[in-house]
Image (cartoon, rainbow, N blue to C red):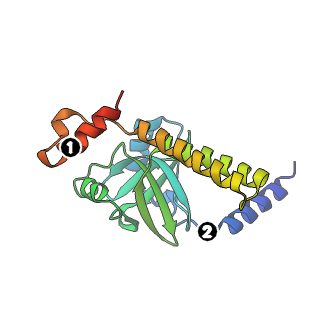
Amino acid sequence: MNPKKDVSRLRERRVRSGVGRRLHEASQLPYTLRQDAQAHWGAGVELAAPRENGCYTGPVISSGAYLVQRVDEKSVIVHRLADVDVSANDNLRRRASENRLSGVQMQIRYVGASAEARFHDPERAAIEEIFGRIHQSAEERFGRGTDSYGAFARQLDEVKQALIEKLRPCPSPSSATRATTARYSRWVARCP
């Protein structure tokens, strides 16, 4: 293995994916962030700054002006909260204003130097990825415009939706209000 070729391949991959420079240096971060991350995820974690046009997924802990996100076994990305837009979801916006983002699974996607945060459901993402791959294989095998592909794709979508519905948690009776009683009854009928 040639280390110079490996580095050039990595740079080439970053250029193709659009991932750019680091938005800030990890050495500029407060030491307390490192301590918080190590206390939460172990002493061996490495802190890094996000990159332009990067996408990061994982649980976060909120630490003042920063969001610390675990993206791998030993990798932690530190986002500046001022750079992250949490207005995509009312619940997420409310949690951010109440400083209750710790423990939330999030996907933070950068466009240039600014980011947008969304809730992330790892189980649903895995289902979407698996069914996406099955669709791709079916398209290669049957051809996109054929009747057999269309019927198969519709059946796959139905199965995927059924799986996603099963993943949704069943609400507790105390969470039902008068306005949602009918919906709650239908929901409970579907729950095992």
| Dot 1 alpha-carbon crowd within 10 angstroms: few under 14, some 14 to 19, many 20 or more | few
Q: Residue at x 54, y 59 (%)?
A: 55
**Left or right: 91 in relation to 28:** left
| Dot 2 alpha-carbon crowd within 10 angstroms: few under 14, some 14 to 19, many 20 or more | some
Which mark is on residue 20? 2
Residue 5 visible in the current orientation: yes
Question: Residue 148 location in percent, x, y?
Answer: 70, 51
Number of the front mark, 2 or 1: 1
Question: Residue 147 location in percent, x, y?
Answer: 69, 56
Mark 1 secondary-structure assignment: helix
Q: Residue at x 59, y 68 (%)?
A: 21
Choose between 109 and 168: the one closer to the eye.
168
- How many numbered marks does the figure carry? 2
Choose between 30 and 61: the one closer to the eye.
61
Residue at the extreme bottom of the image, as rendered: 112
Residue with the mark numbered 1: 182
Up/down of 9 relative to 21, above or below: above
Which mark is on residue 44? none
- The answer to whether the residue labelled 2 contacts the one labelled 1, judged by CB atoms less than 8 Å apart, is no
Choose between 104 and 153: the one closer to the eye.
153
Residue type at the position of mark 1: Ala
**Left or right: 101 in relation to 5:** left
Q: Residue at x 38, y 39 (%)?
A: 168
Splitting the image into 4 quarters, where does residue 177 fall?
Answer: top left
Choose between 80 and 116: the one closer to the eye.
116
Question: Residue 77 location in percent, x, y?
Answer: 49, 53
How far apart are the two marked residues, 2 and 1, measured between alpha carbons? 50 Å
Residue type at the position of mark 2: Gly
Q: Residue at x 19, y 39 (%)?
A: 175
